[in-house]
Image (cartoon, rainbow, N blue to C red):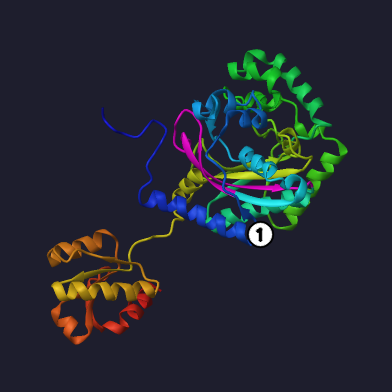
C-alpha cells in the first residue's frame, strides 16, 4: 500500500508553513496587547458537547464531525474538535469561572477537524486562532473585538472586507425565524434539498442557500425584526467602529451557521482567495454558557482561519522573505571548525546564517548559496583563518571583498538595511 496523506489533509513545507506561523505570531502579539490570556483545550471531546452547543441540526454536527466510540471511556462517543468555542466554554464552566470570576478574556489555537469536501482554503484538518470573551454583554466589547480584527488584517497587509449584522436575541428572533419559515415554504421550488431540511429545523440557514444566492434577496431582513434593545446595541457597535476608523459593511443576509449566536454576527473576507474567502468569523452568544450548564453569562468570540489567512497573505505578496543573510563556506578542516564560531557570532547579531557543507567544491557551494537566496557567501579558508579575515561575496552584485572577521556582522547588516 502506498503511504500518502489522506484526502483533505496536507503537508506544510517551507513558505507555506512560514505563512501559517506568521499569522499565528502576529495574532498572538495583538492578543497580548489586548490583555487576552491563553487557554489550551483538548483536541478530543465528548461528541455530546458539540451536539448541545452547536445544535443537532447544524452542518457541523449532522455531516462534518469525526466521531468514534472510546471503549476506555465506557463506550462514550467522542469527536475530534470541529471548532474551538464549545471546548473553551466547557473548560470555563468546569473550572468554575462562570460563578467565581465570570469576566474572562481567552484565546486558543490549534488544529480543528471537519469531514468536508476538500478544496483550496477548505481542508479536513485546518487551524484556528480564536478569542472568547465572557461576562461582557455590552456593545463596546463587540466593537473592541472587531477593532482588534481590523488591526490584525492591517498588520498582515491583507486586503479585506468586514461585514456585520445583528440577528436579534431570544426576544425578537422568534418572529424573524417564523418569517423565514413562511418565506421558505413559499419559495420551496427555488431552494435546494439542504434548505428544504432547514425550513423547520434551522430556518436562519436558509440565507446560506447554495443553489443560487440571488434566491435569498427576497428573504426577510433580520434588521427589520430587531427589538429596541437589540437595535440600540447594534447602533452602538456601528458608532464605535466608525469612531475607531474601522470600515465595515452591514449585510442583513449574513447569519452564522451555529445555533448559539445572538445579536452581533460578523465575517471578514480577504482578497485573492476565490470562493473560500472568509478568513475571520464570529459573533455574540449570550445564552451558550447557560445552555451548557453554566451560569447566565454573556459571551462573544471569533475564530481566525489560519490556513486561509496564510493563503491571503501569500496572494497579497505580503509574506516577508526568509532567505539567509549569508551562507558560510569553509575550505579545510581548520576553517570548518572555526566556521562554527563565526556562525554563532553572526547569529548572535540577529543575522540569518546557513552553514554549507565543507565537503563540497567551491563552485557547487556558491551555486547552493545562490539557490537558497542568500545575499552573501562568507568564505573562510586557511589563509583567511591565519589573517583573521573573511571573503565576503555579494551574490546579488557579483562582487567580492575582504573584511576583518570582527567587522563581518556589521558589513552584512549594513547591506541588508
Side (left or right) of 160 relative to 347: right
Q: Quadrant of the N terminus?
A: top left
User: Residue 162's x, y, as percent?
Assistant: 64, 46
Numbered range of the magenta stretch: 108-137
Q: Residue at x 58, y 48 (%)?
A: 108
Q: Residue furthest top?
A: 189
Side (left or right) of 388 relative to 412: left
Q: Quadrant of the C terminus?
A: bottom left
Q: Nearer the viewer, residue 229 or 170?
A: 170
Q: Residue at x 18, y 64 (%)?
A: 365
309 vs 339: above or below: above
For residue 327, which quarter of the picture? bottom left
Q: What kind of element bears circle 1?
A: loop
Q: Nearer the viewer, residue 11 or 280?
A: 11
User: Residue 98's x, y, as percent?
Assistant: 74, 45
Q: Nearer the viewer, residue 339 or 155?
A: 339
Read off the residue under disc 1: 35
Is 116 inside the magenta-drawn segment?
Answer: yes
Residue 136 visible? The answer is no
Q: Residue at x 14, y 82 (%)?
A: 383
User: Residue 384's x, y, as percent?
Assistant: 18, 81
Residue 350 visible? The answer is yes
185 vs 172: above or below: above
Q: Nearer the viewer, residue 238 or 17?
A: 17
User: Residue 407's x, y, as percent?
Assistant: 31, 83
Side (left or right) of 295 relative to 258: right
Estimate how packed mark 1 is, as few (under 14), some (14 to 19) or many (20 or more) residues with alpha carbons within 10 Å: few
Q: Residue furthest right?
A: 228
Is 370 inside the magenta-drawn segment?
Answer: no
Amino acid at each position: 500500500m502506498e503511504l500518502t496523506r489522506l484526502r483533505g489533509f496536507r503537508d506544510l513545507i517551507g513558505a507555506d508553513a512560514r505563512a501559517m506561523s506568521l499569522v499565528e505570531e502576529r495574532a498572538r502579539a495583538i492578543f497580548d496587547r489586548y490583555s487576552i490570556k491563553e487557554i489550551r483545550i483538548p483536541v478530543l471531546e465528548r461528541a455530546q458537547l458539540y451536539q448541545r452547543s452547536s445544535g443537532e441540526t447544524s452542518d457541523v454536527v449532522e455531516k462534518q464531525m469525526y466521531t468514534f466510540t472510546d471503549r476506555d471511556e465506557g463506550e462514550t462517543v467522542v469527536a475530534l474538535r470541529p471548532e474551538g468555542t464549545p471546548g473553551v466554554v466547557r473548560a470555563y464552566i468546569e473550572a468554575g469561572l462562570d460563578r467565581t470570576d465570570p469576566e474572562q478574556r481567552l484565546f486558543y489555537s490549534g488544529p480543528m477537524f471537519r469531514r468536508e469536501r476538500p478544496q483550496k482554503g477548505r481542508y479536513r484538518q485546518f487551524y484556528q486562532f480564536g478569542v472568547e470573551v465572557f461576562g461582557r454583554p455590552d456593545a463596546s466589547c463587540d466593537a473592541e473585538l472587531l477593532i482588534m480584527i481590523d488591526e490584525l488584517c492591517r498588520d498582515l497587509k491583507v486586503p479585506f472586507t468586514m461585514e456585520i449584522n445583528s440577528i436579534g436575541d431570544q426576544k425578537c428572533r422568534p418572529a424573524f425565524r417564523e418569517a423565514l419559515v413562511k418565506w421558505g415554504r413559499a419559495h420551496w421550488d427555488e431552494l435546494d434539498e439542504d434548505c428544504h431540511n432547514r425550513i423547520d429545523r434551522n430556518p436562519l440557514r436558509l440565507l446560506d442557500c447554495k443553489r443560487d444566492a440571488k434566491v435569498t434577496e427576497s428573504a426577510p431582513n433580520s434588521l427589520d425584526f430587531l427589538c429596541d434593545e437589540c437595535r440600540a446595541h447594534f447602533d452602538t457597535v456601528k458608532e464605535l467602529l466608525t469612531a475607531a476608523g474601522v470600515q465595515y459593511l452591514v449585510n442583513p443576509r449574513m447569519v452564522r451557521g451555529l445555533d448559539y449566536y445572538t445579536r452581533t454576527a460578523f465575517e471578514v473576507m480577504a482578497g485573492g482567495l476565490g470562493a473560500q474567502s472568509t478568513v475571520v468569523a464570529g459573533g455574540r452568544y449570550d445564552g451558550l454558557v447557560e445552555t451548557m450548564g453554566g451560569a447566565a453569562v454573556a459571551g462573544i468570540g471569533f475564530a481566525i482561519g489560519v490556513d486561509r489567512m496564510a493563503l491571503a497573505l501569500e496572494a497579497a505578496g505580503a509574506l516577508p522573505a526568509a532567505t539567509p543573510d549569508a551562507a558560510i563556506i569553509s575550505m579545510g578542516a581548520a576553517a570548518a571548525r572555526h566556521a562554527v564560531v563565526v556562525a554563532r557570532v553572526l547569529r548572535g547579531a540577529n543575522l540569518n546564517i546557513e552553514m554549507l557543507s565543507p565537503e563540497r567544491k567551491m563552485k557547487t557551494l556558491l551555486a547552493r548559496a545562490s539557490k537558497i537566496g542568500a545575499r552573501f557567501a562568507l568564505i573562510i579558508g586557511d589563509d583567511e583563518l591565519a589573517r583573521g579575515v573573511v571573503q565576503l561575496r555579494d551574490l546579488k552584485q557579483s562582487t567580492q571583498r575582504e573584511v576583518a572577521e570582527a567587522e563581518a556582522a556589521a558589513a552584512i547588516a549594513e547591506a541588508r538595511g
